Image (tube, rainbow, N blue to C red):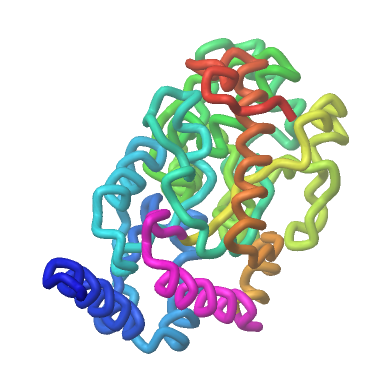
């Protein structure tokens, strides 16, 4: 005979299954890791309507920048694992441990979808005197403490690319912090910073409009969306050992979210990423479509973490060795 206690547990389990099967029953909150106008913000808001069309509910987008992504990841980790709080995040959490920013990375999350990845580009104000990366770096060497670089915090694209530049060229600049790549580009336009390494996606429109000038893409080859902009390896071949490298954009939920809710979100965002309008936008902004989820996305995250963590360790930018966290060398 089944006890009332066991019957109650079974009823609760059945209720939970039925409840999650109806997901989503209300609007979803999408927390964007970085500030308005940056690459993560643009990509997130571009895919939002296509995912909404599949899910049949609104995704209410909220920017929650700070702590190089730690504020938003901590918020989602502490939110209910019910699929109604999802994280639109970039690469930064994969470096939180080695940078001493948080005790967890994406190991506490399930990657619903990694939409796309990008490459970096070094931009200066349109009327800046430097026409090449070499001119910028040589001037910074001659005037130590005078050339200002827009930054978005430890582990972000500007910080990592700056680490590469420091390792290859042995130059130092004055970092000026901003809440996202969009504000960093704006700072360069306004003369509040002399240059910024940012994602191609965050700067493409400003480059095309003539508000900033691109000196080089942080890649071994030029990118189609920025014709005429050279690869940084043309001037500094030693960059090749760190490349290809770049930011990525995805959507995540807590790992302990029910499997059927995960499956619903995976299907919705896969279809959203396949949308021709979204794919064209990514191509126009110099991003490479990935559209991966689950185990494939987790393998990508681990490889990216290994490469980047040990880069920061090798150039002295990591606060804690990747070895302590069992992050293997690439």
Identify the residue at image location x=43%, y=74%: 260
Residue 301 seen anywhere in this rendered image of the structure: yes
Asked whether, in this view, residue 231 is left or right of residue 246, the answer is right
Q: Residue at x 41, y 82 (%)?
A: 52
Which quarter shows the C terminus? top right
**Front position in the image: 132 or 177:** 177
For the stretch drawn in magenta, what is the main secondary structure?
helix
Vertical position of residue 241 compared to residue 105: above or below: above
In the picture, the quarter occupied by the N terminus is bottom left
Residue at the far left in the pictured view: 4
Front-most of residues 258 and 209: 258
Looking at the image, the residue that sits furthest to the front is 1
Residue 294 in the image, given as x and y percentages of width and height: 58, 60
Residue 250 or 150: which is nearer the viewer? Answer: 250
Q: Is residue 163 left or right of residue 268?
A: right
- Residue 33 point in image, percent of width and height: 39, 51
Number of numbered discs: 0
Q: Which residue sits at x=40%, y=73%? A: 261
| Residue located at (46% from left, 28% from top) | 97
Which region is colored magenta?
Answer: 252-277
Residue 312 image position (x, y, % from top left): 61, 22
Q: Is residue 254 magenta?
A: yes
């Amino acid at each position: 005979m089944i006890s009332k206690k066991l019957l109650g547990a079974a009823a609760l389990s059945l209720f939970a299954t039925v409840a999650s099967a109806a997901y989503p029953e209300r609007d979803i909150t999408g927390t964007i890791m970085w500030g308005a106008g940056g690459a993560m913000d643009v990509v997130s808001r571009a895919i939002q309507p296509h995912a909404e069309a599949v899910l049949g509910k609104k995704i209410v987008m909220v920017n929650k920048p700070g702590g190089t992504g730690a504020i938003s990841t901590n918020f989602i980790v502490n939110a209910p694992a019910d699929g109604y709080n999802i994280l639109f995040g970039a690469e930064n959490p994969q470096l939180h441990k080695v940078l001493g920013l948080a005790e967890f990375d994406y190991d506490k999350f399930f990657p619903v979808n990694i939409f796309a990845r990008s490459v970096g580009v070094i931009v200066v104000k349109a009327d800046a005197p430097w026409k090449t990366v070499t001119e910028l770096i040589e001037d910074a060497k001659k005037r130590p403490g005078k050339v200002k670089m827009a930054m978005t915090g430890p582990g972000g694209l500007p910080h990592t690319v700056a680490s590469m530049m420091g390792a290859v060229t042995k130059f130092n600049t004055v970092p000026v912090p901003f809440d996202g790549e969009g504000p960093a580009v704006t700072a360069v336009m306004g003369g509040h910073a002399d240059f910024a390494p940012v994602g191609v996606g965050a700067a493409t429109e400003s480059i095309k409009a003539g508000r900033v000038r691109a000196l080089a893409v942080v890649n071994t080859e030029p990118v189609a969306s920025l014709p005429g902009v050279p690869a940084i390896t043309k001037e500094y071949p030693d960059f090749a050992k760190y490349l290809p490298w770049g930011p990525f954009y995805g959507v995540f939920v807590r790992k302990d979210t029910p499997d059927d809710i995960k499956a619903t979100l995976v299907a919705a965002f896969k279809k959203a990423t396949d949308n021709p309008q979204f794919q064209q936008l990514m191509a126009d902004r110099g991003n490479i479509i990935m559209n991966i989820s689950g185990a494939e996305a987790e393998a990508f995250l681990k490889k990216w973490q290994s490469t980047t963590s040990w880069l920061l360790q090798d150039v002295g930018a990591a606060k804690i060795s990747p070895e302590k966290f069992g992050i293997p060398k690439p």
